[in-house]
Image (cartoon, rainbow, N blue to C red):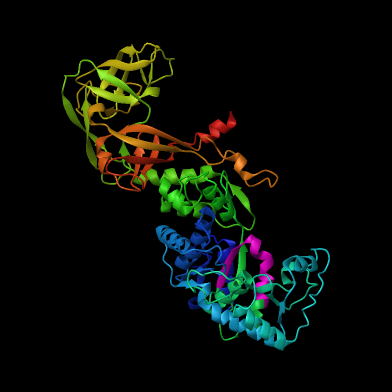
Amino acid sequence: MSAEEKSLNFIEQIIEDDLKNGLSSDKLRFRFPPEPNGYLHIGHASAICLNFGLGIDYNAPVNLRFDDTNPSKEEQEFVDAIKKDVEWLGFKWDKECYASDYFQQLYDWAVELIKKDKAYVDSQSSEDMAIQKGTPTSPGTDSPFRTRSIEENLDLFTRMKNGEFEKGTHVLRAKISMKANNMLMRDPIIYRIMHAHHHRTGNDWCIYPMYDWAHGESDYLEQISHSFCTLEFLPHRELYDWFLNQIYDETKVRPKQREFARRNLSHTVVSKRKLLQLVEEKYVTSWDDPRMSTISGMRRRGITATAIRNFANTIGIAKRTNLIDVSLLDFCIREDLNKIAPRVMAVLNPIKLVITNYPEGKEEWLTAENNPEEEVMTFREVPFSKELYIEREDFQEEAHKKFFRLTLGTEVRLKNAYIIKGESVVKDAEGNITEIHCTYDVDSKSGSGTEASNRKVKGVIHWVSIPHAVEAEVRLYDRLFTHENPDGNKEVDFKEYINPESLKVITGYVEPSLQTAKELDHFQFQRLGYFCVDKETSAEKLVFNKTVGLRDTWAKVSEQ
């Protein structure tokens, strides 16, 4: 790729400059380094698209490396979910790596730091260390254990590894400077004691490396050329480089850390800690609840991998954090589903409609197109009968002039079928309409070519034949939070903004072609929105999730 081929973002410009300055293109290697302590979310999706997209653009390998350095929070379940998400998004990694692959090497390098008097064992409490660290405007003070001999440090570190000490009694710290302007450089912790079972190494280790120590060294071991992180890691870059300086061999590629801004999404939270809170406190059903900002939740809701990739490409890469309106994601979802989702008929708020002049017991199978966006048009057959369900909102007994659906004395077309005219209604004892009676124009059948079939009427409504209708559970999802930035005010608990209307479960009726629909099949319920089949569907019970409406109604609601 060259600058002449397209406009480069600043990340691509960094790579191009490095190539011009002598880095061989066959030395390019990228990585995506998730911690397996939760499910990936929409923010991770952008990072995945960035790193794997660079791999595609530059024909360079990309590693999937799990930062599994904290066994108290990490599980194999999360590893499996992450791999599934990356694959589902359409990307393939070159090597599957784990920080735990390098535990022995990281330990050996730490021993070398001690031997060079560049690391020491500190036996203070974490509270004392925090006090001695100073503030951004005042220097820290040296630990009383900073002058321990190399021999004592080696002995203590070995015994830490062997499990002789309780958690919190000792840590290994780099010996840099307690007066550094960057507080991360004030003798950072390299290792801490943890007696915890690791999902890959079992109980082999009683000490575990800190992220800053494992990150850059893992990049180096894998010969990653460019290590891209979000902006909160900018202050860590100095430490990243300091650690590399201790082990770097000039014959090898030296990884370069560079940072880009998070692209936060409105009406969501993406903190794994807060997502876990939503799951544990039962605000949602699971990590893959369709209201969650997790990739698995979005997949279950019916959002496609293509839509997420297009969204990531649309928002691009920036140097400044900003809030992206979720309506842009909705647009990307609609744009993709419009191309691929078959059009079907479903009625979610049904009222019975009886065609009084339609022959008793007769049924017809009418032809309906599946998707007008298809290059090669395909069709299906839908059953029609005397009794139908239509949407309650599609009828008004007395309507204003701009109501172009069914009223008494007016005509509408039933989609793919006939023109009908409202004649009368049946009401219960409370005055609620229970049935609509109408007549149909027998010569107005869609596609028949008759003069009556070409007659123009102002409204077209969808329907489902009652004798053939298939009952379905329909889950109507809305945004989980009412506030555009629920995490923005640290004085307010983000859960206070949870939308009580984020899920409504109703019973609807769908055309019989959906009887065989499978998990994650996408459909456009005509005039209603896009829906997909939930994983809880079965032969006895169809379950659909609403993915997104046909248009953005939230903006209108917000303006009222």
Q: Residue 234 lies in magenta, yes or no?
A: yes
Q: Quadrant of residue 504?
A: top left
Residue at 45% x, 46% y: name it.
Answer: 290
Q: Which residues are magenta?
A: 226-242
Whether residue 486 is visible: no
Residue at 71% x, 80% y: name it.
Answer: 120
For the C terminus, the quadrant is: top right
Image check: 90 left or right of 36?
left
Residue at 32% x, 13% y: name it.
Answer: 426
Q: Residue 483 lies in magenta, yes or no?
A: no
Outermost residue toward the right in this view: 138
Image check: 248 left or right of 90?
right
- Residue 362 position, x and y percent, is 15, 24
Image check: 175 left or right of 486?
right
- Residue 194 position, x and y percent, is 60, 70
Identify whether 172 is placed above or below 400. Answer: below
- Residue 425 position, x and y percent, is 32, 13
Whether residue 211 is visible: yes
Identify whether 178 is placed above or below 506. Answer: below
> Is the magenta region chiefly helix, strand or loop?
helix
Count of residue discs: 0
* Depth order, front residue of 128/249: 128
* Depth order, front residue of 294/49: 294
Identify whether 252 is placed above or below 76. Answer: below
